[in-house]
Image (cartoon, helix red, strand yellow):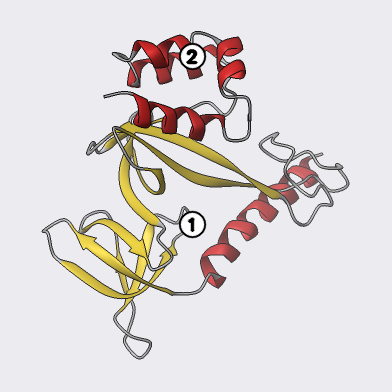
Amino acid sequence: MKKSILLLCLLCALNLCSQSLFNSYEKGKIFFRDGSQAEGLLKLSGFSRNEIKYKKSEQDEKQLLTHKKVKSIKFVSGDEYFYKINTKRRKILLIKRELKGMLELFSYQVQSAGFPGAGGVGFNGGGDSMGIGFGGGSSTVYLIGKENSDLIEQLPRNYKKRKFWVIISKYSSGCKEFSDKIMNKNSIKKNFTNKNTAVVDMVKYYNENCN
C-alpha cells in the first residue's frame, strides 16, 4: 500500500513537471503593475505554474517574472491570466479568467493520477483519470470574484453542497431575480441543468440580467 501511494505521488509530480517543462512559448502581452506593457513570447512555469517565462524574441534570454512585477498576461489566443489572491488560503495564484463582468469567474486545472489498475478513480476522486496507472486526468476548479477586485474565493466542485450556495449568494446579493433561481440545489438544477457548466451558466446569467 505504501509503495502504491509513493508511486502515485511520483506520478502526480512527474505529470505536473512535464506540463511545465514541455509546454511551448506562445506570443502574448504582459501587463505590469507599474502600468507598462511588453509583447513577446510567454510560458507558464513553475511547479504550480504561478511563474511566467518571458522572452522578447526567440534569440533573447528568458526572464522569470512573478506577481511582484506582473498584474496579468494575455496570449494571442485570447486566453487571459491574472494574479489573484485566494481569500481562504491567502495564496497568490496565476489563474485563467473564464468570464468578465460584474462577477468574474476564474479557473485552474487540477491534475490527477490513477492508482495502478484502479480503473478510473483519480487521486482527487474526480473520475476523470484514465485509471491505468500512467496517465491520469484533470478537473477544473472555479473561483469567483467581483469586478476589479484582487480577491477571489474558491467554489466547491459540487454545486449541491450548501457551501456552494452560500458563496454564490454572497457574491450575487442584491439581485432577487438571480437569487430566486439559486435558492437551493433543486432550483440550481432546475434553472442551470448542465451540471458540467452550471457555474459558468450562473455567472453568465448574473452578468447579463443583474445591474
In the displayed structure, would residue 70 be above or below residue 194?
Answer: below
Q: Earlier in the sequence, mark 2 or mark 1?
A: 1
What amino acid is found at the position of numbered circle 1 in the picture? Phe
Q: Residue at 87%, 42% (x, y): give it.
A: 119
Q: Residue at 32%, 14% (x, y): give it.
A: 173
Horizontal placement of 67 versus 17: left or right?
left
> Where, by quadrant of the figure, is residue 154 drawn?
top left
Q: Secondary structure at mark 2?
A: helix
In the displayed structure, would residue 54 be above or below residue 92?
Answer: below
Q: Is residue 205 visible?
A: yes
Q: Give residue 12's position: percent from left, percent from top.
A: 65, 52
Q: How many marks?
A: 2
Q: Give residue 29's position: percent from left, percent from top.
A: 29, 68
Residue 178 versus residue 43: which sits nearer the camera?
Answer: 178
Horizontal placement of 207 versus 197: left or right?
left
Q: Which residue is mark 2?
A: 181
Quadrant placement of the C terminus = top left
Horizontal placement of 151 versus 1: left or right?
left
- Specify the farthest residue to the left: 34
Q: Which residue is mark 1?
A: 47
Mark 2 to mark 1: distance in Å? 39 Å
